[in-house]
Every structure is written in C-alpha cells, then in structure tokens.
Image (cartoon, rainbow, N blue to C red):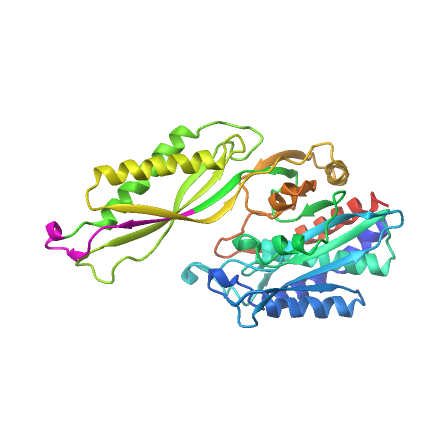
Amino acid sequence: MKELNNIVDSCRQEMIDDIIKMNSIPSINPRMGGQGEFERFEWIEKKLRSYNIGYKVFEIKDEVVPQGIRRNITVSFKGSEDTRKTLWFIAHVDTVNYGDISLWNTDPFKPYDDGDRIYGLGTEDNSQAVIEMLYICKIMKQKCIIAKCNIGFIFASDEETGSRYGLHALFKENIFSPSDEAVVPDGGSSDGCFVEIAEKSQLWIKFTVKGKQSHASMPQLGVNACSAGMHLGVVLEDTLKEKYNYIDELFNPPYSTIELTQKFANVDSPNILPGMDQFVMDLRVLPKYDVAQVLSTIDDIIESFDEVNEGIKASYELLTRVEAPEPTNPDAEIVKKLVSSISETGRSAYLGGIGGGTCAAILRKHNIPTVVWSTLDEMAHQPNEYVLVSNVINDTKIFLSTIVKYC
C-alpha cells in the first residue's frame, strides 16, 4: 500500500488537469435541460484507451438526446479465483442543471482551480468518483493488481433522473451475478467517516390543480387555481409530516422529509386569475412506511380537498418512485473491508442511512450488498460546487486499499 499511495500522490497534478478537462464538457441530464453525457463519455473512452485498458460500451436508445442513444461503460479486471463474483465501483457521468446562473461566482462549465478546490458544475457530484475510478483502473493496469474476485467499474448515465438509461438498463444486460458486491462513491461526509448502508424511499410528485381562468378584477367569474394550489400544498405538507413522523436514528435526518420544491409558471400576466397551477413535492420516506400507504393518504387528501373547494379538480403524477429495499447487512464483506480501510487512516467509521437518491437502492433491490462512501464537502446540486483535490487523492488510496484486501 505504501507503494500504491506514492503512485497516487504522484498523479495529483494529472488528476487536477483531468478534472478540469472533463468538467469543461457539459453533461447535464437531458431531462434537466441538457444535451446528455455523450461527449463526456467520448473523453472517458479516450482516457481508457490511453491507459491501454479494454472496456465495453452499452448503448441505450433515448429519443430525447441528439445522438438517439445514452452510453454506459464497464471495465473489468478478472479475478484469480472466484470469477463468478465482481466487486463493482459505480459512478455516474450525468450532472444536474446549474440552476440560477447569477448565484455562481464562476462559469460552471469553466472549472476554476483555487488551490485544493476546483469549482465547476458536477465536480463533486459525481466527477470526483469518475476521476478516482479512472485512476484506480490505470494503477491496477500498471501494477498488475489481481484480486481473488473480479474488480469491475461502471461509468453510468442517467443517475440524476432515476437511472432508466443507466443502471436499470445494465441489469437487463445481465452483467451482474448474485454474489456481486458494490461501492457507490456518491455520498458521504466531510470527515470521511460515514458509510451509508441504507436509503429512504423516494417520491417526486407533480400536482396539478385545475380551476377556471378569469380576469383578476372579476374573480367571481373564475376559480383561482393558484390560490387553491397553495392551500393544497400546505395541507399536504402538514398532514403528511404529522402522520409519518417516526424517528429512526440510523438515518440523517432521522425522520421522513416531505418538502414542497418545484413551482411552475401558471399565467403570463399579473392581472389574470390562473386556471391551472402545478407544483412538486419531494418525499424521502423511512423504510418503516409503505410507499403505497403514503400515496393512499395523498389520494384521501385530494379527494377531501376537491369536495370542499367547488370548481377545483386536483390530480398528481409520479415523476420518481423508488421504494427502499432492505439495508445492506453490516456484516457484508464489502462493509467490513471498506470500514477497515477507512479505520487504517485514523478515522472512526460508522454506518448509517440517508434520504435516498443514489443508485445503491437499485443494487440493494437486486440483493447486491452495496455501500455508499466518499469524503465530500456536500456541495452537490449547489451553486459554486467544488471538489477538494485532497479528497480525490485520499479516497483513491482508500479504494485501492479495499481492493487489495480482496487479493
């Protein structure tokens, strides 16, 4: 490990250069207003070829992007003994949108190197993991590191909007086996101690409230959908928070989160009474609760709301529905080996759960023991997102240490 750590340290400037180069290529998910990951995948392929590393490309049809396909790349290093088992490292290549550009101090597509920090859209989520995985591949190739089981790497599309064209599609390609394990470097803590083994269920729900449009000076001629929508949002939030209030200390935060988030434009003029109003709620529900039970409660709220608000008709559609699978067993091999590698750096690792949103839930649903871990400043989805180069260096060392424990 001393030799491997020295190699990682020697790659520091090269890693910085690659973070800047890769993050100069926009990779916003197409369902968040971007053109997708295609060009960034071309850059990743070029890097793998420069390392003389073989890889496989899985192309998934998607009519939304200009190329008509979304890419996923896998790299595999064959094991010396149990080749039926693969330890996977999984990172996603897509990013969210930059949001309000006025809140950025620098151009989100022109990464800015400020010593240990590199600012830019997606630098932490999830370029940190992509770069780490590329350099682990490079070092494994250079040093001929062979574990007893296969070591695999997945560079995935579409994680930010549900992984339909990413990990879900790869399961249909039968690349996984029942004995596999996985590491997802897409969550963690600033001290690098938190190891995630469980996630909450995730619901994104878009509500539509219909009334009747009229001139704002003659409200008696219409039915104000905007006012009704605001009231409905408050009723939904208050009722759901009161009913689903269980505390589970495994998670941070230890309760179900139920938040009003996205709001859509309704009319183009301040003197028009809106005939339709739309908004979104983000729910991260503790595994204690059945998602169907939560949706049933929402159905009851809407039915009652329509009854007492004449002329109003409310409905909803599910933008995302991910039901929490069983947590990863704390005694799983990958949990013990990763915790051991973290502890060897002098940190006290601990296990817990988060609000959901990584592809670990998909893996756990297929009974693949999965841990989510990284050292992060938790800048994901925020203006002026940055990655700490020291985190990239140190996490790469810990992942290599974990791989060595499988040798």
Give the camera-side residue of 401 and 324: 324
Image spot of residue 363 (x, y percent) = 65, 45
Give the camera-side residue of 387 and 286: 286
Image spot of residue 372 (x, y percent) = 65, 43
Q: Residue at x 11, y 49 (%)?
A: 220
Q: Residue at x 69, y 56 (%)?
A: 173
Would you say 233 lies left or right of 274 here?
A: right
Q: Please tell me whether residue 307 is drawn above or below residue 52 in the rendered image.
A: above
Give the camera-side residue of 181 and 388: 181
**Residue 298's image quarter?**
top left
Marks counted in the figure total: 0
Q: Residue at x 70, y 49 (%)?
A: 395
**Residue 178's image quarter?**
top right
What residue span does the magenta drawing correspond to? Answer: 205-221
Image spot of residue 230 (x, y percent) = 28, 45
Q: Is residue 219 located in the magenta-colored stretch of the structure?
A: yes
Image spot of residue 325 (x, y percent) = 60, 38
Visible residue check, residue 388: no
**Residue 172's image quarter?**
bottom right
Q: Is residue 386 located in the magenta-colored stretch of the structure?
A: no
